[in-house]
Amino acid sequence: MAIGLIAAGSASHPTVDAARAPFVAVWEPYWAGSAGATRFAGHPGVVSEISPFFLSAAADGSVVSVSGAASMGAAIRAARANGVKVIPTVTDGAGKGGMAAILADPVQRANHIANLVNTVVGGGYDGIDLDYEVFAFTDGRTTWATTMPLWVQFVHELSDALHAQGRMLAVTIPPVWEATTPGNAEQKNYWVYAQDQILPFVDRLRLMVYDWSPGTPSPNAPIDKFVAPVVAYSTKVAAATGQSASKLILGVPAYGRHWRRSADGSPCPDGSLTTSTVTQVSAPDVAWRRDAASGELTFSWDEVVTGPRGASMITLPPYVQDPGTIDNVAPAGANTPAVRLGVPGSIVTCTVRHTVWYPDEWSVKAKADVALQKGWGGVVIWAGSYEVDGTYDRLAEL
């Protein structure tokens, strides 16, 4: 496919008009079960877009399907049957520095753009959503000053190519709530994505406003500390660049976490201190307390745990059968290394403090309301299969 691109450094940078933004969009991951992947279909008129989560950009610039992609078929068919737009998400699978190298080479960049457009047109999709997180979380901040202008140019060129085909471009980025200038020491400030510079070229700018502090028992997306500051900052960015705030989409979580920590810092048995995900669907039916500032639910309890700590593990070499034996049936697992648990270093007892935080359907509604009050286009839920039906009912009330 021949794709016309605007040369870098062009004096004319046409502004992309804000297309009709969705009130509710859903990221649909390939690991979702069929029931979860089509839950949105039971709420016609609420969900406007889905983004099947099954495509990845490879190191050679091609766009490939990940394992389990076939599970997205039901979600795509359900979306089309209900008049819901399908905008697949493409993640960065090129590895550390891979996508940055593609963007730095004009030939590779043009090839990657062609592959993205061909994926959209060939699949009959309404557009595409870029979720290139390697810049922020793998490449390292020292690369950002070089990557940022190349990223902006890439988004500009891809936007032109997709719009020439009547398709939309959505871009998903980490949140920013401080000045987007190189050198800022704030780790949460992912200025490499240059939202102020790419906003004129995209139809949707989706901000992932969750995972506030996954290492510490805390809300996933607190309204007071996280959602409100991000919404305020990005609204200012839109106004400063002459763009409609309706292009901005708030990424909201339908999940939280369950932390297991030592109540007083004393040693605990091996494997007893962990962190796991709690979705709206899997959240236990208990007496929760709603935290007024964050808008999320929380509860905790203590458990006394006794077990080994500092146990040693001995790995034995693969079993080799004696060739002289008359028994020619190999034991189960004979060709794999065997692991034997050694003598425990000690037996300890401690009190494990369990703490759960998660955003229920009312919390999602409250977060959405913060964005909608500032003229944002809507929300995108992470992720389909995590949410309960009530989440759509609450959003419909807005």
Image (cartoon, rainbow, N blue to C red):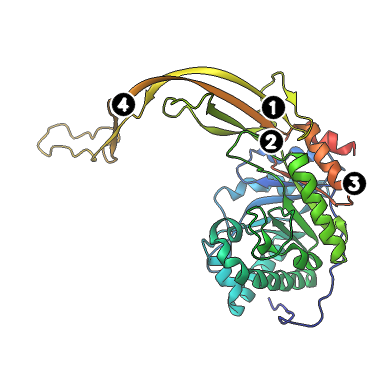
Query: Given the image, on which type of amino acid does mark 4 rest?
Result: Gly
Residue that carries the numbered disc 3 in the rendered image: 373
Q: Secondary structure at mark 3?
A: helix
- Kindly check if marks 1 and 3 are in contact, taking CB atoms under 8 A apart as contact: no
Foreground of the two, 191 or 120 = 191
User: Element at badge 2?
Assistant: loop
Query: Callout 2: few (<14), some (14-19), or many (20+) C-alpha neighbours within 10 Å?
Result: many
Report whether residue 18 is seen. no
Tag 1, which secondary structure? strand
Tag 2 and tag 1, C-beta contact below 8 Å: yes
Q: Upstream in the sequence, badge 2 or badge 1? A: 2
Q: How far across and how far down the image is residue 389, in percent?
A: 78, 32
How far apart marks 4 and 2 lie (CA) works out to 36 Å
The quadrant in which residue 218 appears is top right
User: Could you tell whether 80 is left or right of 32 in the image?
Assistant: right
Going by the numbered disc 3, the residue's amino acid type is: Gln
Residue placed under numbered mark 1 in the picture: 298
| The label number, if any, that marks residue 345 in the structure image | 4
> What's the residue at 85%, 43% (across, down)?
370
Q: Which residue is mark 2?
A: 219
Q: Is residue 113 left or right of residue 10?
A: left
